Image (cartoon, rainbow, N blue to C red):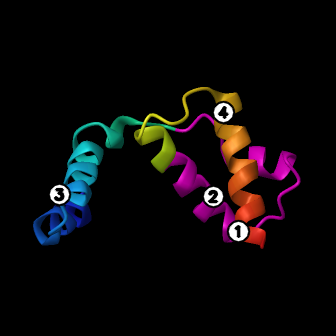
Amino acid sequence: YKRQLFDLARAENEIVRERITRFIVTGRKVKLRIAGKDLKALGIPEGPLYQEILARVLDAKIDGLVDTREEELSLAQKVSERLAH
């Protein structure tokens, strides 16, 4: 939370400020319906990549781009494929 406030204070771009504010207000309450075990079930090799994948899915959920568990899994697979290349 402190990190987001610091980033908000430093942000010069209005879009960045708006996204940080949205995260502070609503994003902290957002929880993913998937976890590392789900990534493993998708066949994604275990490792530090999981954190990046889950962070990107969480960002998409905060932005309202995904909602259901199936959408989260689909996005996780797509993100994994992009990061692998």
Residue 68: x, y in percent? 61, 26
| Foreground: disc 2 or disc 3 | 3
| First reached walking from the N terminus: tag 4 or tag 1 | 4
Question: Residue 73 lies in what quarter of the image?
Answer: top right
- The quadrant of the picture occupied by the C terminus is bottom right
SS at mark 3 in the image: helix
Residue type marked 1: Leu
| First reached walking from the N terminus: tag 3 or tag 4 | 3
* Neighbours of disc 1 within 10 Å: few (<14), some (14-19), many (20+): few
Question: Residue 10 lies in what quarter of the image?
Answer: bottom left
* Neighbours of disc 3 within 10 Å: few (<14), some (14-19), many (20+): few
Which residue, given by chain and number where applicable, does mark 1 sit on? 83
Which residue, given by chain and number where applicable, does mark 2 sit on? 53
Residue type marked 2: Ile
Residue 55: x, y in percent? 53, 56
Q: Nearer the viewer, residue 3 or 20?
A: 20
Q: Tell me which residue sits at (22%, 39%) in the image.
A: 25
SS at mark 4 in the image: helix
